[in-house]
Image: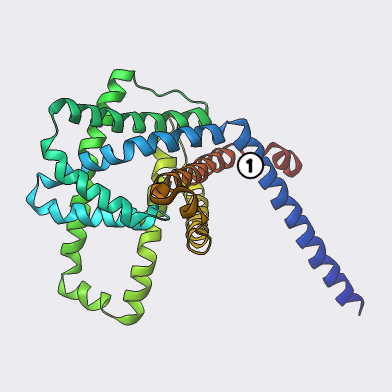
Amino acid sequence: MGGHIKKTYFIRSLVFRTSAKLLFICSYLYQRFVKEGCTYRAAALAYTTLLSLVPLMIISFSILSLIPHFVEMGHKIQQFILANFVAASANVIAQHLTIFMQNVRHLSITTLAFLAGTALLLMYNINRAFNAIWHTEPHFHFTISFLLYSLVLLASPILIGAVMLLGTFLVRLPWIASIIQMPYVAEPLFFLLPYVLIFFVFTTLNWLLPACTVRVWHALLGGGITTVLFELARYGFTVYLTHFPTYRLVYGALATVPVFLVWLYVSWTIILLGVVVTKVVAEGIPEFCSKDE
């Protein structure tokens, strides 16, 4: 009887200490999130993304369209991005992008240069936001950074298209195709693949963008938390828009823009929270470090 009481007391004590520690960690992360001004940075990035997303995708798909083998890949990449990174209004945005892509050939060089500058501005602001949270300065001069952003803007679509083309080639190999066609392999694989790719994107951002050395497992932890929160937010946002469509009554045909802007703000808030998590994990929480010592 006494052993049972001690065991129950131990379990309750363990649950209480664990809950208190998790609550303290969440409180500490929130304080750091606010202290770094992430809410304002998320709002600025959301607005910049709203202005830069169309130019960025137009330039990317235009580059892919120059290579015959990558034409279909551009449409697949667009569908993947809209399906997995946009919580709502993906179909409407896809329709507008298609219209813009059809008109891109009629644009002047000056207009294309302006679109490229807008896309580069987004990349610059993202890099600056990450380094501001890490309290680091980029190693390169602005001119060199501009050239690097331009290189990334030009090379990324080709690299992504090449990876997808390679994946398509590998899937068609007989021995790989026979494995993928197995029911207990195909369903989990195609279900998990989008989440793995999203996790890879967030982890890569946390690892490469700060102008300092970030350990891989710190970036993995930050990317994992960002992925989980991002998917939960995307699901909740979609459910809200589906069951509470009051925004359509207020905005009518213009509802796509404010809804998309709100989703961009939520997305950048989560992404910057992941950056804060990565930095806090790298630094350690002083209170717990002192207690452990």
In the orientation shown, which residue stands out farthest toward the right? 2
User: Which image quarter holds the C terminus?
Assistant: top right
Q: Position of residue 262 (x, y in %)?
A: 48, 45
**Picture colour scheme:** rainbow
Horizontal arrangement in the rendering, residue 260 relative to residue 95 (left or right): right
What residue is drawn where x is 52% and y is 31%?
133
In the figure, 125 relative to 191: above or below? above
Q: Quadrant of residue 289?
A: top right
What residue is drawn where x is 36% and y is 29%?
124
In the orientation shown, which residue stands out farthest toward the left? 68
Q: Quadrant of residue 185?
A: bottom left
Front residue of this view, candidates 80 and 104: 104
What residue is drawn where x is 38% and y is 72%?
188
Horizontal arrangement in the rendering, residue 140 relative to residue 251 (left or right): left
User: Which image quarter holds the N terminus?
Assistant: bottom right
What residue is drawn where x is 49% and y is 60%?
235
- Residue on which the image places disc 1: 29
Q: Position of residue 287 (x, y in %)?
A: 73, 39
| SS for dot 1 | helix
Front residue of this view, candidates 166 and 50: 50
Q: Position of residue 125 (x, y in %)?
A: 40, 30
**Kind of residue at badge 1:** Leu
